Amino acid sequence: MSEFDTKLVHGKPQNDNNTGAVNVPIYNSSTYIYPSVDANVLYDYARSGNPTRNYLEEQMAMLEDGYKGFAFSSGSAAIHAVLAIFKPGDHLIIGKEIYGGTFRIINQFFKRWKIEFTAVDTQDPTAVEEAIRSNTKAIYFESFTNPLLHVTSVKAISKVAQKHHLLTIVDNTFLSPYLQRPLDLGGDIVVHSATKYLSGHSDVIAGIAVAKNKELAERIYFNQNSIGSTLSPEDSNLVRRGIQTLAVRMDRHLSNAKEIVEFLQKRPEIAKIYYPGIKGSKDFEIAKDEADGFGGIVSFELKEGLDSTKFVEGTNLIQLAVSLGAVESLIELPYKMTHAELSTEEQLKAGITHQLVRLSVGIEDPKDLIADLAQSLDKLN
Ligand SMILES: *Cc1c(COP(=O)(O)O)cnc(C)c1O
């Protein structure tokens, strides 16, 4: 069982299966019997360990090529548990375009606990190196950013990190291990919102962290077990099941995104398209080298004067909603929805204009998606 797509379907062989069931059971047990008071039991209490959750955790460790995986009740909980391995006085360098919720945990939570942060454009390894201080402990970034799809080189940043004995932490939500395995490129910890591509059906909120080595795994496990934001057995099963179809879903996300980009390139209403698969940018060069595809998110700007609200409200098949990475296509206006927390000034500085639209391309027939976009564009003229 060496090919990645086969691993997605079969996961880890099970060692407790006496029934012939092809899937791991959903173990709804909060506690476990001790054969004797001093028995060295595998499981004692489900916050500390649950076989359904552990199956998913091992599946993710295998797919990300890490030492150990951890499943959390959300991507945000996974990020919290990972950042909580640091201590007051530590300094972290973070990508300047990170998920809004991550920015919120950093600014409104971890800063209160006296962890220091500097936001840097991680596409520029020199800028990252210049931001390193004597108390810097890690560099945290998303290899494809949201919503502008700027691509950071995991290889280049982890090289800087290794030189200065820092950890490299990568949020791999936008790519999934099918398209990129940051630990193989030099990263130390990977985090995911499993709510997105890993589960893939908009039916669960979940998070994953994978550590490259035992020492990091122990520090994350301590936080997972003591803070307790673990994933339930039912939700662990949903993510496990989603992962089995990751390859076929992702292949269709990629081919649909490519067709939609080609369609948008021909439309006069479009001012600019953000997609790493478009040749000629630094994003394309890095993605071509370090990822096995350009992802399923396409962002674009409508020309000045066209009504962006009317456009996103005018699609019929494509639903107006936040979130991404699911089988159904979702469209949104970042300045009013996902990135509404930023002030207008911060939005414009980050390149989030009022004309910017983010599309999470689903796995529907591309002809229907293109027809839906076309009819909504037509109504703007
Ligand atoms: C959604 C998302 C998160 C947060 O995950 P939740 O499951 O919503 O808590 C973190 N990072 C990225 C890149 C995301 O898209």
Image (cartoon, rainbow, N blue to C red):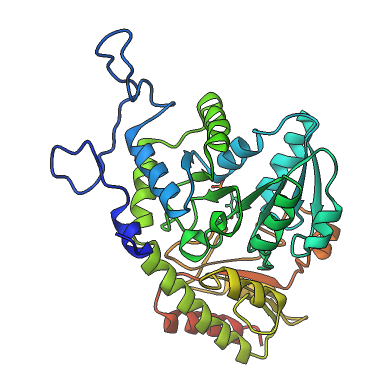
Q: Is residue 248 visible?
A: yes
Looking at the rendered image, the quarter that the C terminus falls into is bottom right
Looking at the rendered image, the quarter that the N terminus falls into is bottom left
Considering depth in this image, is 248 or 339 the residue closer to the camera?
248
Give the image quarter of residue 186. Answer: bottom right
The image position of residue 360, as x and y in percent, is: 54, 67
Q: Please name the residue shown 31% across and 13% down the image.
A: 39
Q: How many marks?
A: 0
The image position of residue 304, as x and y in percent, is: 77, 80
Q: Please name the residue shown 50% across and 84% down the image.
A: 259
Considering depth in this image, is 212 or 277 the residue closer to the camera?
212
For residue 355, above or below residue 94:
below
Considering depth in this image, is 12 or 175 the residue closer to the camera?
12
Q: Please name the residue shown 66% across and 77% down the image.
A: 285
For residue 222, above or below residue 91:
above
Q: Residue furthest left?
A: 19
The image position of residue 335, as x and y in percent, is: 72, 62
Q: Please name the residue shown 13% across and 44% down the image.
A: 20
Is residue 322 rendered to the left or right of residue 139?
Answer: left
Q: Is residue 341 visible?
A: no
Q: Residue furthest top?
A: 37
The image position of residue 252, as x and y in percent, is: 42, 74
Is residue 378 rendered to the left or right of residue 195?
Answer: right
Is residue 38 rendered to the left or right of residue 228?
Answer: left
Q: Residue furthest front?
A: 163
For residue 346, above or below residue 289:
above
Considering depth in this image, is 350 or 153 the residue closer to the camera?
153
Is residue 124 rendered to the left or right of residue 245?
Answer: right
